[in-house]
Image (spheres, rainbow, N blue to C red):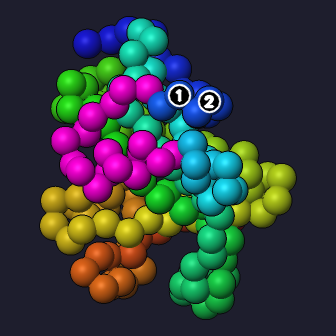
Amino acid sequence: MTGRVKVAVLDSPKIPFLETGDPDIDSFFKSAWEEKLYCNNVTYILHLDEIPAGFASVSMKSLYVELPQGTKSYPALLLARLGVDKRFRGKHIFDGMRGGEYLLKYIVGLTQKVGERVGCRLVILDTDPGKLELYYRNFGFESSGPKGKKIGMYYDICETLCDT
């Protein structure tokens, strides 16, 4: 399944139809415009042939973590939510990538661009232990420790951009 792929910022109060099958993620997505109006996060919509196929919502945060340059608080882009419409889940949408992988690569690229302008070192997220944790580890994320019932994870963009 390949088609024309585009990622665009949600720029209208008209939320496109997208159903992940996870009530928490679907509810979050339905409030994306309101969250943007209150400057809480920005949502990016993944379109495949003009059909909404997934989304990622991000905001700024920091993470206190040990890295080669020292243990301190590093600026980060928080991946608040990521969801792929159940019609597209598990399907390769572009260049052998599935929707979630495409969105993660997009967010890492966005973090690199933000980092060039204002300083941003990490992509961070909280996930459920188990299958999703392994998914993010395979992508290159590392654990930052437990956060209640979730696992905190980070991806260091400087590992590919900086000499440590």
Q: In the displayed structure, would residue 5 be above or below residue 152?
A: above
Mark 1 belongs to which amino acid? Lys
| Quadrant of the rendering where the N terminus is positioned | top left
Mark 2 belongs to which amino acid? Ser
Left or right: 90 in relation to 46: left
Q: Residue 110 bears which disc, if any?
A: none
> Which stretch appears magenta?
16-32
Q: In the displayed structure, would residue 13 be above or below residue 145?
A: above
Would you say residue 143 sits in the magenta stretch? Answer: no
Q: Which residue is mark 2?
A: 12
Position of residue 58 measured from the top left corner of the image (x, y, whole percent):
56, 53
Q: Residue 14 bears which disc, if any?
A: 1
Position of residue 146 measured from the top left corner of the image (x, y, whole percent):
32, 85
Would you say residue 26 sits in the magenta stretch? Answer: yes
Alpha-carbon distance for marks 2 and 1?
A: 5 Å
Nearer to me, 40 or 59: 40
